[in-house]
Structures are given as structure tokens and as C-alpha cells.
Amino acid sequence: MPDHATSEHGTRLDSTRVHVTPDHAVSNRIRASRAAMAPFFRLFEASAYATRDPDDPENCDFVFGNPHEMPLEGFVTSLARGLTPQNQEWFAYKLSEPESQRIVAASLRERRGMPFESEDVLMTNGAFAALAVSLCALLDPGDEVIYVSPPWFFYEAMIIAYGGVPVRVDIDRATLDLDLDAIEAAITPRTKAIIINSPHNPTGKIYPPSTLEGLATLLENASERHGRPIYLLSDEAYSRILFDGRTYHSPTMAYPYSLLIYTYGKTLLTPGQRLGYIALPPTMPARAAMREALMAAQVVVGFAFPNALLQHSLADLEKLSIDIAALQRRRNLLVEALTAMGYGVRTPEATFYLMVDSPSRDDEAFAARLGVHKIYVLPGTIAELPGTFRVSLTANDAMIERSLAGFEAAYEEALATTSAPQPAAP
């Protein structure tokens, strides 16, 4: 066989001079991002969830905040209305449409009691894109971004992908509140931003005003000390999923250098229809420059604007919500039932999720044990909470009722295994 060949375009390919493997084509940045996401991908590659029969009607799937009931009727009818073209540009390229910006600003003025302006709203295809756009606009190589652990799955990977250095700070594990002393200790002259997720996934904690005011004070002091603002990315995906009549307090109300990030995918339980936004509070200095930077970032990260149909439907979608009372009822049922079985359970103040203590230290092994009973949960190790597992409250009522016997059996099996005599060490 010859040691060279000719491509279809006539270019000589000399195998004695060029040695290319697929690994050589992958950037170090993406390698590092992929490594940060390894626990998440393990769920799809080597777990009971990965090997389940997805079509088995007996499955009790509590892994993600996915719908297990038909969509809201109002959601479907709204999209149907928006589908009918009213002019020749109905499905043309869309940026942040003025009507969408107006609707969001009006909603924020009502919900936050602050005079948000339409021009300070940037429509995005979900909170995922809003976070990517924000990091892209803010970060230079080597800038540090503080994020709180346990985190949303992709914070660390996304910080790396946009050239930043992720800095992990644990919550106060006793109170589930922010550890302000630890955050202050983590700030350096390279700190460019901090990501705060409230209500917090996965713990369900809503950070109180006193905590947010304390955070604002330390960020203001650090910004003054280092001669540049530290930006706060406020991930508010679950800010309308509140239990027991609680009130949500946004970090943007306490700290002017904040970017409010929101998605309608949680409130509507439609994560496959990507609609969200970034909003700048009216207290932020020099907002025009930030708007320009964010819009440029929306283009370069992959035209991160929501599609035409969702923007046409936003006036209706803004008014809709899934049944929060039903979520709260499911939360109460599971907290009561699992506690009675012997599980340690914290009652979440908000979000879709319930964090439960695993009866065995190896939460992934216990998740596999639950899988034998066709119950699928998120092992806490994936969310940096080893020894626990997460249960999504978006499961339907029949699924929850069906799961209770399996939860109890798995708990008893784990206790029996733990209490069984162990072989003597060699």
C-alpha cells in the first residue's frame, strides 16, 4: 500500500509526515469541561437509569424535572395561536423582540417592585443560554468565577468553556444557607463573577434577605478593594416554584451589578421549549455598555435568541404556571412517607426536588438498588452531595403511589446488608 494518497480535491496526503488522531482535534478547554461533567454523563453511560427499559410502564422516573403528565392546555393553545402568520416576517430572524421585552419588564416590575426597563431585557433560548451568554460577555482568560456547591450540573464546565477558572465554595451544610465567610475568603483580585442559584437546586433553599444583603455588602467591599466590579449571576429558574406561601427575594434587589437569569421551562414544565431572558436591574451603572456586550455574546455563542413562535406566544405564556399546589401535595406525601420508612428527609422550601439521605454511604449503589425496584433517582454524588439522592416532584401521582413499596423494600435491603456480618480482614 502506498505511503501517500490523494484527496478528492487533489491534495497529497503523506502518511509519513502527518499523524492525526481524533484526540488531537479536541481543545484542552473542552477536555476540561467534559471532565467536569463526567459524573453527570456517568448517569447515562453506567447506571441503573442508563440500562432501564424506557418504555416499561412500571418505571418510576424521579431523575429529572421532566413532565410526566400532558402539557398545560393553555400552553398548547397559545402556541397554536402564535403559529398563524400575521405578516410576511412572522418567522424571520428574531432578536429580542420589543413586545417580548415589554412583557418581561412589566412582569418584573410587578414581581420585584423595581422599575425594570424594556431595553434592559435580553431574550434568550432558556436559562442555559442566558448563563452561557453572560459568561461569554464577562470573562477573560484566567478570570475566576465563584459558584456554590452543591451546584447545578453544568456551572463548572461552562465557566471552563468560556475561559474562566471555577472556584467552588460549599454552602453551610447545617442551615443550607450561603456561607458568607467562605465566599469572602474565596474572593481574589481575579474574581470576576459569582453564580447564585436561589431557590437552590437541589436543596430547595430560598436565600433570605439578610443573607442577600450580607452578600451584597461583601461583594461591594471586594469590588472597591480590587478596583473592578464583581458581577453576580442570579440563576432564578425556580423563582416561581415556591411552597407554603413563601416569598422570593432576588439578589438583584440588593446588589446593582447583578444579571437576572430566568427560564420559563420550569414554571411551564416545558424544558424542551427554550425560552428565557437576562434582565439588568435599573440600579446597575453603565447598563448600555453591558447590554451591547450581552447582545454581541448572544450572536457569537450561537444566536442565543428564542425562536419566533415562543416570542409570539409570550403574552399568554407569562400568565401560565403548572399546579404548584399539586407539587406541594406530592412533596408532603413523599416527605411523610419516606420519613416514616426511616429515611432522613429535608422539606424543600421551593423547586422541583426533594433531597433524601441514602441509607448506605454509597449513594450510587443505593440508586442501583432502587433501580431493581424500577425506581430511578439522581445519586447525590452527581450533585456534589454524596450520601444522598434527589427525587423530582414532577412525577405524577400514580408513579409516586407505585414507588412507595419499592422505596421501603430498598431501605430494608440496605439496612440488612449493612448490618450483616462482614468477613474478617485478611
Image: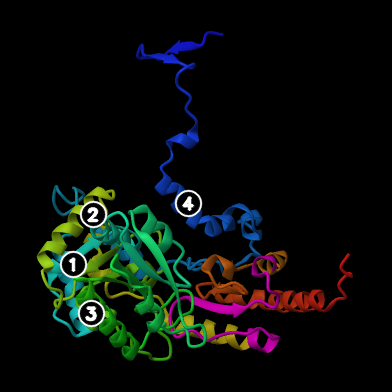
Marks 1 and 3 in Cβ contact (< 8 Å): no
Quick one: label 4 or label 1, which is nearer the N terminus? 4
- Numbered disc in front, either 2 or 4: 4
Query: What residue did someone put label 3 on?
Result: 220
- Numbered disc in front, either 1 or 3: 3
Query: What residue did someone put label 4 on?
Result: 34
Image-quadrant location for residue 133: bottom left
Q: Secondary structure at mark 4?
A: helix
Is any part of residue 50 visible from this angle? yes
Is any part of residue 270 visible from this angle? no
**In the image shown, does 52 or 400 lie closer to the viewer?**
52
Tell me residue 92's x, y (percent). Answer: 18, 48
Q: Secondary structure at mark 3?
A: helix
Q: Secondary structure at mark 1?
A: strand
Give above or below for 402 relative to 179: above
Give above or below for 116 relative to 90: below
Characterize the local packing of mark 4: few (<14), some (14-19) or many (20 or more) Cα atoms within 10 angstroms.
some
Residue 357 lies in magenta, yes or no? yes
Quick one: label 4 or label 3, which is nearer the N terminus? 4
Tell me residue 68's x, y (percent). Answer: 51, 67
Quadrant (top left, top right, bottom left, bottom right) of the C terminus: bottom right
Amino acid at pointer 4:
Arg
Mark 4 and mark 3: span between their CA atoms? 34 Å
Marks 4 and 3 in Cβ contact (< 8 Å): no
**In the image shown, does 301 or 144 lie closer to the viewer?**
144
Mark 3 and mark 2: span between their CA atoms? 28 Å
Query: What residue did someone put label 2 on?
Result: 298
Query: What residue did someone put label 1 on?
Result: 121
Marks 1 and 2 in Cβ contact (< 8 Å): no
Amino acid at pointer 3:
Glu
The magenta region covers: 338-365
